[in-house]
Amino acid sequence: MESLWAPWRMEYIQSIKSGDCIFCTLPPKNEDQKNKILYRGTTCFIIINTFPYSNGHLMVTPFRHLSCLTKVNPEELEELGQLIQKTVAILRQAYNPDGFNVGYNIGKSAGAGFDEHIHAHIVPRWAGDTNFMPVLSETKVHPEHLEATYTRLQPHFQKLSL
């Protein structure tokens, strides 16, 4: 039998889940590296997904607590679009993926983990990145630690301008 080690998961498993909205509670802490916030814009920010589908899985979200894309104002919508576009370009440069999944999960039934705060997912994809592990053992293997993802991407986002 083979063993998979993911020691960084223990911190999450043992942590107390507050039910608070991470998109509202993390930015005011001003601990961007700890909270994996890569970029702060005027109305929106970019954060690493701590439970990624693949390495480099990022989210773009307004600072305001909004439950649906129909509730964002024109300034937020413009910045969301620009940040999604720039994020794809940065991920292409940093990871050289074969493609991307980009989208919103609006509402619990659509798969939103935080359904009361709209956020766009940008997920780098590679040919053959789906394998037998999720199918046979409900396990995903990520070759890069989240700290390494932050360290790789943060210099790119420091140079980002809209």
Image (cartoon, rainbow, N blue to C red):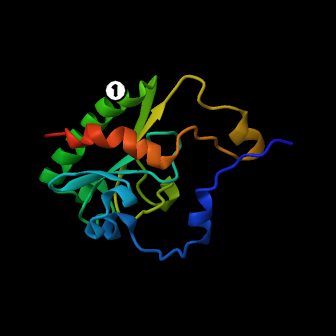
Please tell me whether residue 15 is drawn above or below residue 90 in the rendered image.
below
Q: Is residue 59 left or right of residue 28?
A: right
Q: Is residue 75 left or right of residue 152?
A: left
The residue under the point 56% across, 72% down is: 15
- Which residue is at the front of the view, 132 or 157? 157
Q: Is there any visible trace of residue 85 in the rendered image?
A: yes
- Which residue is at the front of the view, 98 or 2? 2
Q: Is residue 95 left or right of residue 66?
A: right
Picture quadrant of residue 123: top left
Please tell me whether residue 100 is drawn above or below residue 42 in the rendered image.
above
Whole-percent x and y of residue 83?
Answer: 24, 42
SS for callout 1: helix
Picture quadrant of residue 162: top left
The image quadrant where one finds the N terminus is top right
Whole-percent x and y of residue 97?
Answer: 45, 26
The residue under the point 26% across, 53% down is: 45
The residue under the point 36% across, 33% down is: 91
Q: Is residue 43 left or right of residue 99?
A: left
- Which residue is at the front of the view, 40 or 128? 40
Quickly name the residue at label 1: 93
The residue under the point 51% across, 58% down is: 109
- Which residue is at the front of the view, 41 or 77? 41
Residue type at mark 1 is Gln
Q: Is there any visible trace of residue 103 in the rendered image?
A: no
Please tell me whether residue 39 is drawn above or below residue 11 in the rendered image.
above
Whole-percent x and y of residue 90?
Answer: 31, 32
Please tell me whether residue 26 is drawn above or below residue 96 in the rendered image.
below
